[in-house]
Image (cartoon, rainbow, N blue to C red):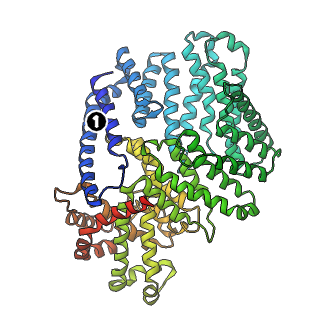
Amino acid sequence: MREYQEKYLKNLRRVYELNAIPAGLPDPREYASERALRFRELQKLKEENTAMLRRELFPLLDNIITALPGEIQNLEEFAASMNDRGMYLDLGLCWYLHNAIITYARHWGERNLLIRHLYHGAMSLFYMQEILRRAERTDYCRKMSLLFGEAASYIRQYDQIEDMETRGYIHRAMGNLALAYAGLDEADGRRKLSAIRRSLQILEDPVYHEKSPELPWKLYITKSHQERTTALGVLRAGVADPQIQHEVMVSAEYVMDEFSRRPGGQVPLRWRYAYEAAQYHCGVRTLSYLLNWLEGVYMERDEQDYSPEGFYCNMFLPALYASYLDHSREDLYSKKYVLSFMYRRLEKYVRRMPDHQLSESTLSNLLACLQSFVEYPDGIQEKDFILTLVVCRSPDGYAASYMAAQIARRMVKRALKDCPEALLGALGLNDAESLRAHRGSLEEFVYEACLLHNVGDMAFSNFRRRIGRSLLEEDENLIRCHVYAGAKLLSQSPSTRPYVYAALGHHRFFDGSGGYPAEYHRSEDPNVMLTDLVSAAIHLVHLMDARDTGPDGSLPLDEALAKLKSESGTRLSPVWCRLLIEMEPELREYLRSGQAEAFQAAFRLLRG
């Protein structure tokens, strides 16, 4: 690799380290000061990386068809190096590199090169799509399908392709077409199984085995059966399709048999679950049996086991268990104490989790628990559960939300005194007297809305922590989807449902001229004036972010209020901008200790 590429990768690893959650529970003031130093180093690294890419890489990508073969080989090595032990250091840039090489290969008729990077480009999109799936988005599915499909179509030229590696990419692309169908509806389930069925027909054909005896046919076939068992998600969603049930059962049995034959005969828990669940969905086992089986394997696992098996059991099994309780109202209530026990144990498990072990897989397991959360009237509220887990993974984010929450409460108090008409209609209260009588409810609403507004960002936390350069268009598109992920999470339970609009709309401009998402409509928000208030408080804290403090640690309130004034009526509600500007003395007083108080609150939650 080139010198700049080695330096770029080194910088990316340092960026990830700097974004790590601190070990132990430091003094809040010392932590704030250290955080500011970390931010300055991060900015320096990002600027250095961006400059290197603009100087060394982007000019080559812009004129990729004129590149020399040695330069293309170097780009391939660079892209491969960013996939560090299966963990992409820079997912967005990987996609740019593969896409550029695809353009080069098409232009020059480099068939083997084209097939290889159609596959790798599609896999880059797949990992981006896996992140987007947490927000119920399918932005990359069609493009991924086209790339895999084009690579797979070279099966028609199989005999003309002598390179065994290229033949392997054709088979892998054909099997991975199933990855493009990520929905939980019957249509996507049928498309997924159809793609796998076509792939297996060729993978099991002895003619191809004779043509390419060097290829790992057994591995390809096993991977295809493993992928087919993921259609259990379609069955859990309530689709009762006999063909889907049959094919999932066949694959679950195949995978169980394959692992049983290996030395030791130990079958990983996820495939044991697939077998038991498939039997339930095919009517062989009862729901009661499946629930009891899940309880048994859950209790067998050490609650401090952070191995891959431990993650699956302690983090994902509660989500599976909760999803099956939805199949029976009777079980939903009879198993209340079992599920509550799982949630309490999960909370402790996540608190103790080493930060470096929060992979995309474990993050998906955690989010699955939140998205399938069952909230009982007299049980654990998802609102509290979410806050506890969010702070475990992002004390910085919690502290910022906490400061916004404290400011929002002060705004409600001031508004009730000076301009109660600004709150008319909030929580269904239509006169000043009613508003003042329910001051506590109004304060509680904006306080909790601020704490919960950015919960969707957790779905993108690992992705964010790896960005060590200026944002690419793909990065921005992904990050913006945190509002959908937040709205999806908060719509799950009664305790969180009132805050869906705050999560969805806090980045949308007041006058509709900018921001995101377009799906947030002010006319549909029953508490639009409170969403406006929360947005103003959040934006003020963002402008005063402690990472931008001066050497004395003072927060730049004057600059932040000046910025608010310039955005009044466009980005933010003029009512709340004016109120915040009038509250300048009160805000200054709060900020003397507000930041330390926010980090103290975060660390207090971390202690449990």
Of the 4 image quadrants, the one containing the N terminus is top left
Look at the picture and state if 24 lies above or below 414. above
Instruction: Tell me the amino acid under the disc marked 1.
Output: Asn
Circle 1 crowding by C-alpha within 10 Å: few under 14, some 14–19, many from 20: many
Q: Nearer the viewer, residue 165 or 292?
A: 292
* Image x and y of residue 204, in percent: 72, 20
Query: Does residue 517 appear in this view?
Result: no
Please state the horizontal and vertical placement of residue 484, each as a whole percent of the image: 50, 55
On screen, 70 above or below 497? above
Which x, y percent locates residue 44?
23, 42
Left or right relative to 140: residue 81: left
Q: Name the residue at 30% across, 60% down.
A: 28
> Where does residue 210 sit, x and y in percent of width and height?
69, 10
Judging by the rendered image, the residue that carries numbered circle 1 is 49
Q: Residue at x 37, y 49 (%)?
A: 21
Q: Residue at x 34, y 63 (%)?
A: 600
Residue 598, visible in the rendered structure? yes
293 or 547: nearer the eye? 293
Task: Tell me: 553 left or right of 101.
Answer: left
Helix, strand or loop at mark 1: helix
**Which quadrant: the C terminus?**
bottom left
Q: In the displayed structure, does residue 272 sit left or right of residue 2?
A: right
* Residue reaching furthest to the bottom: 433
Given residues 199 and 61, the one toward you in this image is 199
